[in-house]
Image: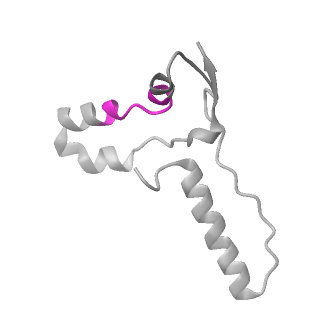
């Protein structure tokens, strides 16, 4: 799912703006930050459980298996996700 995380999109935007500023001889004056996750604290008893709370690929698989004809819609309406560093993991 490369490129779909909010972090990846923010980083790509930052890189593009930096390149534009460099090309036009401008001083970069921007701050790009992805939105905070809705639930930034994840309590789980295992690392696997924690990651599945952050993103469970089975949901995508189930949706695609149930409606393969909706592939483009599912792909286009993909929820914005955050990467691991956006969360605080607690042992539960």
Place of residue 86 in the rendered image (x, y in percent of width and height, measured from the top left) = 64, 39
In which quadrant will I find the C terminus?
top right
Q: Residue at x 40, y 31 (%)?
A: 56
Q: Nearer the viewer, residue 12 or 71?
A: 12
Q: Nearer the viewer, residue 51 or 24?
A: 51
Query: Where, by quadrant of the figure, is residue 60 drawn?
Result: top left
Is 57 situated left or right of 11 in this image? left
Q: State whether the magenta stretch is mostly helix, strand or loop.
A: helix
Q: Which residues are magenta?
A: 51-60
Place of residue 1 in the rendered image (x, y in percent of width and height, measured from the top left) = 40, 50
> Farthest residue in the top direction?
92
- Looking at the image, is 92 positioned above or below residue 48? above
Is 34 situated left or right of 46 in this image? right
Q: Residue at x 56, y 43 (%)?
A: 83
Does residue 12 show up magenta in the picture? Answer: no
Q: Nearer the viewer, residue 31 or 43?
A: 43
Q: How is the image coloured?
A: one colour
Q: Residue at x 66, y 38 (%)?
A: 36
- Looking at the image, is 27 positioned above or below residue 11? below
Q: Residue at x 67, y 80 (%)?
A: 20
Place of residue 69 in the rendered image (x, y in percent of width and height, measured from the top left) = 17, 44
Place of residue 62 in the rendered image (x, y in percent of width and height, measured from the top left) = 25, 31
Query: Where, by quadrant of the figure, is residue 44 drawn?
Result: top right
């Amino acid at each position: 799912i490369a490129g779909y995380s909010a972090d990846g999109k923010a980083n790509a935007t930052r890189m593009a703006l930096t390149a534009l500023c460099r090309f036009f001889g401008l001083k970069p004056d921007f701050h790009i930050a992805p939105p905070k996750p809705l639930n930034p604290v994840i309590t789980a008893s295992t690392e696997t459980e924690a990651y599945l709370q952050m993103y469970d690929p089975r949901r995508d698989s189930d949706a695609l298996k149930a409606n393969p004809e909706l592939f483009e819609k599912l792909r286009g309406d993909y929820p914005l996700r955050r990467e691991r560093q956006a969360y605080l993991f607690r042992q539960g």
